[in-house]
Image: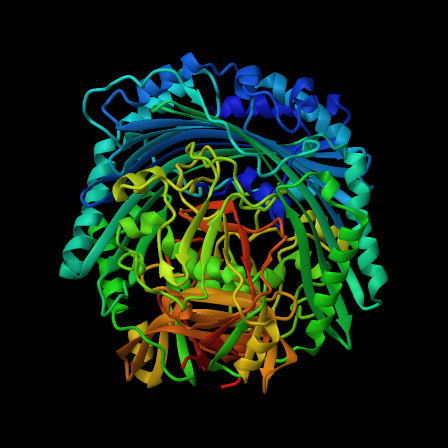
Amino acid sequence: MKIFSRRDFLKTGAMAGAATVASPLLSRDWYALSGAEAPGYFEREFGITDEMCRRVLAEALARGGDFADLYFEHTVSNYLSLEDGKVNRAASDIALGVGIRTVKGDQVGYGFTQELGEKPMLAAAATAATIASGSGRPPGGRFSSLRLADYYPLKSLLTAVPLESKLPLVQAVNDRCFALSPLVVKVNASFADQQKRILIVTSDGVKAEDLQPRTYLTAVVVAEKSGKRERAGWNFGGRRDFSYFTPALIDELAKTAVDRTLVMFDAVQPPAGEMPVVLGPGLTGVLLHEAIGHGMEADFNRKKISTYCTMIGKKVAEPFVTIVDDGTLPNMLGSINVDDEGTPGQKTVLVDKGILTGYLQDKISAKFYGVQPTGNGRRQSYQYAPIPRMRNTYMQAGPASRADVIKAAGNGIYVQDVSNGQVKIGEGDFAFYVFQGRMIENGQLGAPIKDVNIMGNGPKMLANTIMVADDFELSQGGTGSCGKGNQSAPCGFGQPTCLIKSLTVGGTRG
Amino acid sequence: MKQELYDLAAWGLKEAKAAGADACRIGIDGERTVEISYRDRKPENIKEASTKSLALEIFVNGRYSVMSTSDLRRDALKDFIGRAVAQTKLLAEDPFRTLPDPKYYQGRQTIDLEQVDPAYGALTPGDRHAFVKAIEGACLETGGDKVISVTAGSTDGYGESLLMTSNGFDGYSELTYFVGNAGMTGKDEGDRRPAEYSGAVALRRRDLPKPEEIGAEAARRTLALFGAKKIKTETLPIIIENRVVSRFGDGFMQAMFGRSIQQKQSFLADKKGQKVGSDFFVLIDDPFVKGGLGSRLFDGDGIAAVKRVMIDKGVVRDFYIDWYYSRKLGGEPTTGRPSNVIVPPGKRSVAEIMKDLGRGILITGFIGGNSNSTTGDTSIGIVGQLFEKGVPVQAVSEMNIADNHLKIWQRLVEVANDPYPYGAERVPSLVFKDVVVSGA
C-alpha cells in the first residue's frame, strides 16, 4: 500500500492520461540497439547471470515451494505536456527492480527489491519462500531462452528520439486545435513514451526477455459557446515507434478532439429507464472488457466468485458472437510477446460462436484446471505478483450491416464512447459512463447525448446481443489501462456495432 | 534512516545546481510494507518489501521538469540529473514556474500529529497472522452456509518522507499505517454471487476496529445484497452511506482545484462567494487531526498547513490552489491538495433519518460512473437498499442516479451523525431529496 508517496503523486500528475518516460540513463550501447536486439540486456547493464538467478531461485524454493520465478524490470518513461500554448513541462521516470515469487499450490509468497545485487535479491527470495514450510529442492538444469515472435517491431527506440523532435509534435496539436474553431479556448496536449525491459527466469528452466514500448499523443479541448463550456479529448498510440506520429495523424487527432467537444453543445439527456442500446464500433469494446472479460479471468472462476464459473461449454450468446482476447495484434496496446511469467503471447478464444470455451489463464490457474497457460499472467511492475489479465479483448465482426443494426433498435440510444466502467464479478452487474452518444429515434440517429450511465448485467447483455454488424474496429488509443487487484496494465479494446436488446440508462428525466 | 534521506537530498540538490539548475525541490520517500491475505483458512499471499524513491523538480531559466527514479545508485542518479537539467533547458519558458516565495514556508505548526504508532516495531508475524485469521473466521462464521469464498487481509507499513528545496525549505514526516479487510462472495438465487467487503485503515493500530468486527461486517454486507434487483425509475430521497460518500463528493471536489479553474474545466470557477448548496453543506479542510490520514504540517510546495473552511452553509469560500496556479490565476495560494476533508456531523443516526423519510434508497455502494468537472453533470451506478418507514424492504442493483453538482447539493437536506473514521474524508452519511433513481 502506498499512501502519501510524493513520487507517486508527481507521477500521477505527470501521467494525466497515462505514462511517463525518462531521459535515457543507459549506456551508449543501449541507444544503438533496436529491433532484434541482442539478448542479455540485464547481464550487460546490471550483471545478472544465470548462476546468480539459480542461487536466488534456490533460496526462493528453500522451504519447499512448488515453483519460483524472477521478474527483472527496467522501465524508462518520458512525458511532455503543453498548457496555455507552450510545451512547458517534462517528466521522466525510471523504475528498476526485481520481483521474486514462490508458489505453493495456489499460495503465493512475494518479495521485491530495487537493488539488483545478489544479497538483496536473496533476502527478497527468503521472504517469498515463507509461503511454504517444508524442505527445499534446487531449481532444474540449464535455463532455456524462449524464442519469441515480435508483435511490436521498432525502427528506432522511443527513448532514443531527441526531445527536439518531440516538442514540435505537441505544439502542432495545440496549433491545429485552435485553428479548427474560434470556440476553442483551451488546449492541453501531451506526448508520452515508455520502454519497458523485462527478464523472466523461472525455476522450471524458462528464460525470456522482452522490450515493450508504449507511446501516445493526446489532445484535450475546452470550448465556449453562449456562456456554456464543454470539454472532450482524444488520443492515438499503442506499442509503436516515433514514425507513427505523422502530420496526417496529428490532423486527425486535432479534428477528432475538436469535433467531439463542439458536438456536446447540442447534447441532450436521454430519458431514464430500460431501452435498446446500440454500441458503436471500436472504443465501446471497453464495455465488453469490463462487463464480460473480467468474469472470464481464470482466478475469479477458480475461486468460484465469477458468475461464469459454471458456464464452460454452455451457450452464453447467439451463434454470431465470438469473443477473443489476443496478445498478438501488431502494435496494439495490449499485445505482448511474452507475458510476465514467461508464457509466449498468443490469441485466446473465450466465446466461440456463442459457446463459452475457456478462461484467461495464468500458471497457477492453468495448473488448477489442468490446461496450458494462455499467456495472460500479467503485472503492473516488479512490485506485484502476476495475475490473470486481459490483453486486447474484442468481439469479432458479425453478419449485419451497421444501418440495419441502428434501424432495428427503433427507439433507444447509440453509444459512441464509454469510460469509467466497473463490474461486480459475482453478480455480473456493471455500470459505464457514456461520454458521448446519440439518441436513436424511429431507427435513425438523433440528437447527441452525453454524461449518462448505462447499467446492466454481463451474462444478460451477452445473451441479449441480438445483432452484430460487419464493421469491426480496434481502438487506436494508447492510454487504455485496466485495474485489478490494485494493479494497472495496458489493454486494447475493439468491437463491431452491435445491438443490445435492453440496458438501463441513467438519465435525469424519469 | 532520516539522516540518510537528508544526506541524499542535499547531495541531489547540489548535483542539480552543479548541472545548471537555478532552483530545485527534491522529495525522497522510503517505505516498508507487509501484506498478508488468507483464503480457505490458509495464507493465500504473503508479500514484504522495502522501497525508496526520489523525485526532483528542476527550475532552469524559467523552465521546469520533474524526474523520478527508484534507481538510487549515485552514479546513475548523477547521470539522470544531468540529462534532466539539459532536457529542461529545451522546454518553453514558463514565468509562473518558480519555487514558492519562502514567506509561505513560515508559520509551520510544530504539533505532534500522532501519525506514528510506537507499537509498530513490536508487531510480529504471529500478530499479523492471528489478526487475519480472526477476520476470516468471523466472516466465515457470520456468512454460514451462504459463503462461496472469503478473503481476509492485512497490510501494515512504515513510511518516511523528506521534502527539501534550494530556497531554504526542508520538512520531514513519517507515519505508520494498518489495514484490515475482508471480502465475501455468497451463493444467491440462480447464478448470482453477490460480493461485498469491509475494511478499515488507520495510522495507529488501536484505531482499527476489532478483526472480528471487520470479518462479520463483510458477511453482513454481502448477505444484505441477496435478492437484489432493480425497481422502476422513481424520484426518491436517497441516503449515501458514510463509507462511500467521498466517491460521490469527489465529483464536486474536482472542480475546486486551481488547475481546473485556470484551465476552464471547473463548474465552480465563477462561484466563489456564491451559494452552491443548502445550509447543510459545510466542508472544512483540517490538516491537524490527530492520527488523521490526511494530516500534515506542510504541503507538496512546502507551504505551511492551515485549517480552512472551504464551503460554509453552501457558500464557496475557498479553492485548492497551489503555488503555480496561484501565480497563473493572480491570487494567493491556499494548498494544492486536500488534507482531511471534514463535513461536520449532524445529530441523528441513519436509522432515525430513515424512519422519517418514508420511502427512499440507502446507497451502500457505487459502481462505474463519472462526473464532468467542466459542467457538473454526474451519473453513477448504485447498489443499496430500498427502505420504507425505516425498514429495508429490497436490495437494489443495476440502478443509477444522475444529476448536476450545482443542483443536487441544494437538495442536501440532512447530515447524519456518523463521520467515517477510516479515511482522509471524514464525511458522515448524507441525505438528498428528490433524486431520480433510474431502474426498470
Say left or right for A158 vs B163.
right
- In which quadrant is the N terminus of chain A drawn? top left
How far across and how far down the image is residue B59, in percent?
75, 35
Say left or right for A77 vs A188.
left
Residue at the image position 54 percent from the left and 34 percent from the top:
A149
How far across and how far down the image is residue B398, in percent?
39, 72
Front residue of A343/A484: it is: A343
Front residue of B171/B132: it is: B132
Say left or right for A235 vs B305.
right
Observer able to see residue B331: yes
Q: Considering only vertical position in the picture, is A113 above or below B371? A: above
Q: How many marks can you see?
A: 0
Say left or right for B28 vs A342.
right
Residue lying at the far top in this picture: please name it: A51
Q: Quadrant of residue B13?
A: top right
Q: Considering only vertical position in the picture, is A95 above or below A258? A: above
Residue at the image position 54 percent from the left and 62 percent from the top:
A397
How far across and how far down the image is residue A287, in percent?
49, 62
Q: Quadrant of residue B264?
A: bottom right
Front residue of B184/B277: it is: B184
How far across and how far down the image is residue B324, in percent?
71, 48
Q: How is the image coloured?
A: rainbow
Front residue of B405/B38: it is: B38
Q: Considering only vertical position in the picture, is B421 above or below A152? A: below
Observer able to see residue B14: no
Q: Considering only vertical position in the picture, is A208 above or below B331? A: above
